[in-house]
Image (cartoon, grey):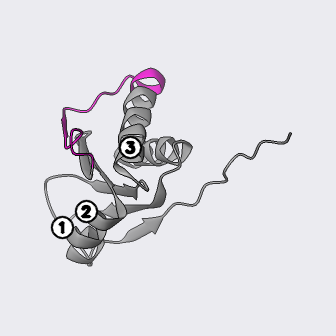
Amino acid sequence: MKPDQIALAIAELAADRKAVDIVELDMRGLTSVADYFLICSGRSDRQTRAIHEGISLGMKQQHGLTPTRVDGVTEATWILMDYGDVIVHVFTPETREFYRLEQLWGEAPLKSFEFEQATSVA
């Protein structure tokens, strides 16, 4: 998979777990660390763990990809998942506001993701 395809797949999996404010920063030309940062938020530490698990399981089952490194699951206020060319940051709202990665990397082109949420009909 190409890095942009990986980022989109991760964004879709995060949305499936009700992640909010899903954005992609295009880091190409700005750093050699990764091509993209995928940033999203969960409403609580419990939800950030669920988002992490959804991404991990989905990427492994659907694409055969596992992160080379994962940090922050215990505290779950900022979970970092390293997929090589794509680094995933799953934040609680307070931690995201504190670190402000979008502002720190303000020169990076930003793409927001909006996904339709499935609704159940009784």
Mark 2–mark 3 CB contact (< 8 Å): no
Report whether 114 appears left or right of 94.
Answer: right
Mark 3–mark 1 CB contact (< 8 Å): no
Q: Is residue 71 magenta?
A: yes
x, y percentage for residue 41? 40, 57
Tag 2 residue: 27
Q: Magenta segment range?
A: 60-76
Residue density around tag 1, few if under 14, some if 14–19, many if 20 or more, within 10 Å: few
Mark 1–mark 2 CB contact (< 8 Å): yes
Query: Circle 2 sits in a helix, a strand or a loop, which is it?
Result: loop
Tag 3 residue: 46
Report whether 103 appears left or right of 15.
Answer: left
Tag 1 residue: 30
x, y percentage for residue 113? 52, 60
At horizontal 26% and vertical 54% (from top left) the residue drawn is 35
Residue density around tag 3, few if under 14, some if 14–19, many if 20 or more, within 10 Å: some
Q: CA distance from mark 1 to mark 2?
A: 5 Å
Using the image, determine if residue 117 lies above or below residue 51. below
At horizontal 47% and vertical 45% (from top left) the residue drawn is 14
- The C terminus, quarter of image: top right
At horizontal 26% and vertical 47% (from top left) the residue drawn is 79
Q: CA distance from mark 3 to mark 1?
A: 33 Å
Q: Quadrant of residue 121?
A: top right
Looking at the image, tell me whether mark 2 or mark 3 is earlier in sequence order. 2
Q: Foreground: 111 or 97?
A: 97
x, y percentage for residue 70? 20, 37
Kind of residue at disc 1: Leu
Using the image, determine if residue 116 lies above or below residue 65. below
Q: Is residue 11 magenta?
A: no
Kind of residue at disc 3: Arg
